[in-house]
Each structure stands twice: as structure tokens, then as C-alpha cells.
Image: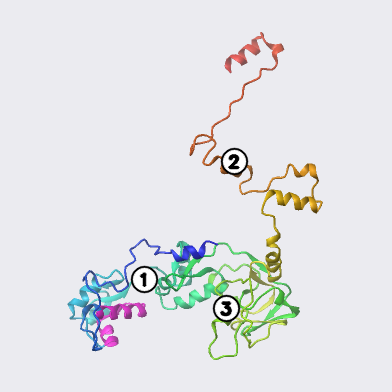
Amino acid sequence: APLPAAAAAASDDDGADDDDDFDDGGSGGDVEDDDDGEYPPSDPTARSVLVVELLKDAKVALTLADIRDELDFDVAGDEEVMERLRGNARVDVLEGEGAAGAEAGGPLLRYRPRQVAHDVVSLLAAVDAGRGVPEEDLRDTYSGAADDLARLVRAGRVVAVKNKEVGGRVFFPRGRAFLTRVSGTLEARRGSDTLGTGALDLTREMRRGEAIGLGDAPVADLSADLARWHRVGSTVSARDQPERAKAPPSVSSNKDLSDKNRYDQDFGEGEIPLDRPAEVALSGRAVRHGCTKDVKELWLRTAALVPQTDAELVRKLLEAQLVDTASSRKLKRITPGGAKGRKRRRGGAGEGAAGGAPRARSRPMRETNLHLKGTAQYDGVMGDA
């Protein structure tokens, strides 16, 4: 629904300015081009760029000696580069941190990612806490974050949306998942890349590339839950898997993958191919995200037939003899919030002045029990009123 638009406008969740990863710390100049291709570059900003790129890839703190060994130039005595690194919002310069720094006779340098995570649990928490987190910010958090992101996407724990404006993907929280059981009792041996279905042909319920979970019982541990999720296999007989045959980032699809694909594994009566060997054995039920393929196709075929106006709805109900003419006059379309929702839409913020609180309606009182008038009890009650 609104996710693609939100992804296009997604920004950093930490509220920080969108500084470039290779901020030169206020030098006021751009990186100069080295026409002669010299190495190391003569421009100190270009040298600092190389250091930041190294720190970003390493994902751990490095000594100045580590940097020298990797880049073949010494930054220990290069004050211009060190000044830029100390002023870079994406670099931590840890002075005198630990034995490694002391032995090297200088500080430790570490890349500071925009998001904070150290494992798959905290990675998922970073997505759930955000309003759209760029993939690059998540991949930079720790070694193995890219693989954990792929596991979260495969299982449908997050929503990955392509950012059409700047490229890459933006990750959004999934929220509560809607899971349904796949028909039949399924069998899978640990290490097998095929799910046995007996005599069932589940092509009417699943598509290639869709997510399928082995077992229908809830799994509290995140890593164990991710291990049971697969995609229905879509590998083709080619050296490189073409884009048209790759599983989509979504866990459920409205159409099949390309007709040009020639798959390595059969999908039909008796078996479901898996995208990787099963990490858990199964003899029981499996689950998928959302409605099965046949139910979804039924909805797509009939969605255009749903009446769009109250008058059209009443006409169709009368034609089907589901209501009579008298009762049709009392029909009202169900709306979000019921009668209160309709009043809010008609009256805006309230039924009184614009934007004000609803006003109580006063009605004239009608006296009753007049035969008691003149008695002490009647006069006492009316006096209190």
C-alpha cells in the first residue's frame, strides 16, 4: 500500500544529518582527481576516504599499523588525514584503547554505523524501531549482517522495498504475520532440498519463490524460527541465476515467475522443491504467509464485481433475493468505526463548532406522576431537582 512511497522518502532514523560517509571533517574541499593515478593519493581527503572505506569493510577497530599494512601508506604521522578522521561523524578515534592500541603507539580507529546491531535479534529490533531503514545502514552494523538480512527477508520477518529514487532497498517492520496452513502432512529429512507431499499437488496453493515454513507450531527463538523458513525452489539450469528466476523479496506473489524459466527441480504431485537444504526435519504441517494461491486468485477474479456504491449493492442483493424491498430501505454499508465513524466523518472533529468537542443535546423535560403533586414527597424531590 503506502510502503513504496514511504521507502522513496525514507531517511535516517537516528535524526542525524545525512552526512556523507567520507566527510572530511570540515576541510571545505572536494576530493581532487589524481590524473596520473598516483598511489597513495597526494590529496589528504582522498587518503582519508580510503581509510574510511577500509574501516567500513572491516567492521572492527583497527590499529594504525593495521591500516598501514592494508593500504600501504602510514597515517600515524599524517596529521592532515588524522584531522579529517577525527572530524568525521562516521569514525570513532579511540585514544589509548587496550593493549593493541598501546603496542601500536597510537589510537584505534573504528567505523561508526548509523544503526546499532550486533546479531540478528538486534538487527530485527533496529528495523522494527524505524520508519524505513536503508539496507546499507543495516549491512554496516556487523560482520554477517548481510546474511542475517537475507534470512529475515526469506522468512518474511521484515518488508524489503526497492528505493526507486536512490537505489538499494529500504526495510520496514512486518508487524503481526498472517499465517495459514498448507494442505496435507508433509515430510522432510534434515539436509534434503525436497518436501514430500504424498499424493498431493500443492501447485494450486503455492508458487515458486513464495515462503514456506516447516512446522505450524509457534517458535519463540528467532534463530530457530528463521531456520525453518524456505522459499519454494526456483533454481534454473544456468551458471548464473537470472533475475527472472530469483525469489522475490515479498513472501507472497500474485503471479508466477517468468514462463522462460526452465527449473532444475520438479514442483507438482508428491513434492515441493526447497531453495536450500532443510535445517530441521518435518513430519507434519507447514505454513505460508497469507491466503493460498487458489483463494487469492478467486479474490482477484471477483474483486471487480464488488459493488462500489450503496445503490449498486442494494440492487445486487435484490437480484439475488437476499433481501426484500422493505428491508433494503434500511440497509447501510458497514463503515470503519460504525455509527460513531459516520458521525465523525460528517461532523469533522466534533458536532459542535469546527474542531471543538461534541455538545450535549438538551431536551425539554416532561413532568410525570402529577397525581402526587402537593405531597411532601413530591415537593421534596422536585425541590432537589
User: Which dot marks residue 235?
Assistant: none
Label count reads 3
Real-space Cα distance between discs 2 and 3?
Answer: 46 Å
**Rendered residue at 63%/48% (across/down):** 335
- Left or right: residue 260 compared with residue 305: left
**Rendered residue at 49%/37% (across/down):** 354
Image quadrant holding the N terminus, namely bottom right
Residue annotated with mark 3: 247
- Left or right: residue 346 compared with residue 6: right
User: What are the residue bounds of the magenta stretch?
Assistant: 46-71
Residue extending furthest toward the top: 374
Q: Nearer the viewer, mark 1 or mark 2?
A: 2
Q: Secondary structure at mark 2?
A: helix
What amino acid is at disc 3? Ala
Q: Residue 103: name its quadrant.
A: bottom left
Q: Secondary structure at mark 3?
A: loop
Residue annotated with mark 2: 343
Q: Percent from the top left, x then y, of residue 258? A: 61, 80
What amino acid is at disc 1? Pro
The secondary structure that most of the magenta stretch takes on is: helix
Mark 3 or mark 1, earlier in chain? 1
Residue annotated with mark 1: 113
Residue 248 to residue 298: above or below: below
Label 3 CA crowd tier, 10 Å (few <14, some 14–19, many 20+): many
- The front one of 255 and 359 is 255
Real-space Cα distance between discs 3 and 1?
Answer: 29 Å
54 inside magenta stretch: yes
